[in-house]
Amino acid sequence: MAGKKEYEEKTEELLKDIVQKHQVEIYDVEYVKEGSDWYLRAYIDKEGGVTIEDCEKVSRELSDKLDEADFIKDPYILEVSSPGLGRQLKKDRHLEKSLGEEVELKLFEARDGQKEFAGILKSYTKESIVIEEGDKELTFERTKIAMVRLALDF
């Protein structure tokens, strides 16, 4: 079986023309197993947020293209949706768009007795992420970060 990364990359390639046509952008693509089912998820976004109609149009066209390309041999469930309000920031392009925003960061192992931090995303490099928490800047090695996402502000 081909790798999950290959499936995600090929799906993202198929999506490029579709998202351009519908004036949305690719946020992320993931191929994951949950329970006994495989899911191919395409997250799309646009300024002001995506609508159900955006997701439906992209889903129909992507489904047709996936059927034509037929590179995923196992049965899977296709989902096209918005990344949501508390979206994970997995890629550099996600971090770039979120500079100056409040984020939540979770570590694999505790640092100074805590695993979760929140603050304003100040900067990032290939090796680290810097947030401003109150009046101090905290730097975290990316290899030690389990997850970064936009903070939900209610």
Image (cartoon, rainbow, N blue to C red):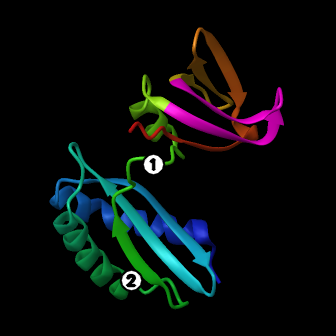
Q: Could you tell me residue 55's position as x and y percent?
A: 25, 67
The residue depicted at 53 percent of the width and 90 percent of the height is 73
To which residue does mark 2 refer? Answer: 69
Residue 116: x and y, percent? Answer: 68, 37
Q: Where is mark 1, residue-wise?
A: 87
Q: Is residue 116 magenta?
A: yes
Residue bounds of the magenta highlight: 103-120
Q: Name the mark on residue 126.
A: none
Q: Is residue 109 left or right of residue 8?
A: right
Q: Amino acid at mark 1?
A: Arg
Nearer to us of marks 1 and 2 is 1
The quadrant where residue 143 appears: top right
Q: At 59% from the left edge and 65% from the top edge, which residue is drawn?
A: 5
Q: Is residue 94 above or below residue 40?
A: above
The answer for how far apart the CA atoms under marks 1 and 2 are is 29 Å
What residue is rendered at 68% in x and 30% in y?
127
Q: Earlier in the sequence, mark 1 or mark 2?
A: 2
Q: Is 89 placed left or right of 17 in the picture?
A: right
